[in-house]
Amino acid sequence: MPKIVDHEQRRREIARSTLDLVAADGIDGVTMTTVSQASGWSRGVLGHYFTNKDALLESTFTVAMAEVNARLTEAAAGPDATVALRACLEELLPLDRRRLGVARVTLAFLAETLASDEVRSALARHHEAWRSTVTRAIRRAQVEKGFAIGADPERAADLLVAVTEGLRHRALIDPSFDRRRQRAELWRAVGALLR
């Protein structure tokens, strides 16, 4: 009896291995050979799923964003409004290996938006989903914690998302900007906004 293969699951596994490589070595460290070695699948199997490195990276980006969105949804539903808001913002900072890979892949695809309307639309959808989740978390914090946010929740979300993106980019180019400093700067901005 032939073995039943879950092709989507295999694509996700390969994409996660690729994301680990991006976190460790950046986009330039990704080749079909390095992904084959990291994932444990032969080049032939990779070629069955991905025609080239670009297709592999596109799939990796899609899988990463779907997983980020799932984690954001879970974080936003957490029992404490302040913790939920914190998790929704910190999910996009490169605070660990997984999030570093996501940040590097996202940055690589950001450059692609100059040439591709499709990539631009995909990034815009994911960005809007994140901003909407942060907006809901702020509204919840206002109700449950009595946060007095001077701006309306959507404006506050825009500001916090912009600050978080700036911190993410800084962390990618400045190795001395470690996790402790990323969190401190983020929460300084949140504190100023929530007073």
Image: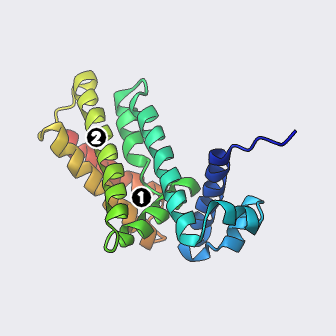
Dot 1 or dot 2: first in sequence order is 2
One can see residue 26 in this view: no
Q: Secondary structure at mark 2?
A: helix
The quadrant of the rendering that contains the N terminus is top right
In depth, the one of 138 and 47 nearer the eye is: 47
**Number of the label disc, if any, that sits on residue 5:** none
In depth, the one of 131 and 113 nearer the eye is: 113
In the rendered image, residue 19, in percent from the top left (x then y), is placed at 58, 60
Look at label 2 and name its amino acid. Answer: Ser
Which numbered mark, 1 or 2, is in the foreground of this view?
2
Q: Determine which residue is flagged by label 1.
A: 181
Classed neighbour count for the residue bearing mark 1: other residues with Cα under 10 Å, few (<14), some (14–19), many (≥20): few
Mark 1–mark 2 Cα distance, whole angstroms, equals 26 Å
Residue at 32%, 62% (x, y): give it.
120
Q: Determine which residue is flagged by label 2.
A: 132
Q: Quadrant of residue 6?
A: top right
Q: Is residue 101 left or right of residue 186?
A: right
Q: Is residue 108 left or right of residue 14?
A: left
Instruction: Verify CB contact (< 8 Å) between mark 1 and mark 2.
Output: no
Q: Is residue 114 left or right of residue 83?
A: left
In the rendered image, residue 151, in percent from the top left (x then y), is placed at 12, 41
The quadrant of the rendering that contains the C terminus is top left
Residue farthest toward the front in the current orientation of the protein: 1
Q: Quadrant of residue 26?
A: bottom right
Residue at 43%, 27% (x, y): give it.
78
One can see residue 76 in this view: yes
Q: Secondary structure at mark 1?
A: helix
In the rendered image, residue 156, in percent from the top left (x then y), is placed at 19, 44
Look at label 1 and name its amino acid. Answer: Arg
Q: Is residue 46 above or below residue 5?
A: below
Residue at 56%, 54% (x, y): give it.
98
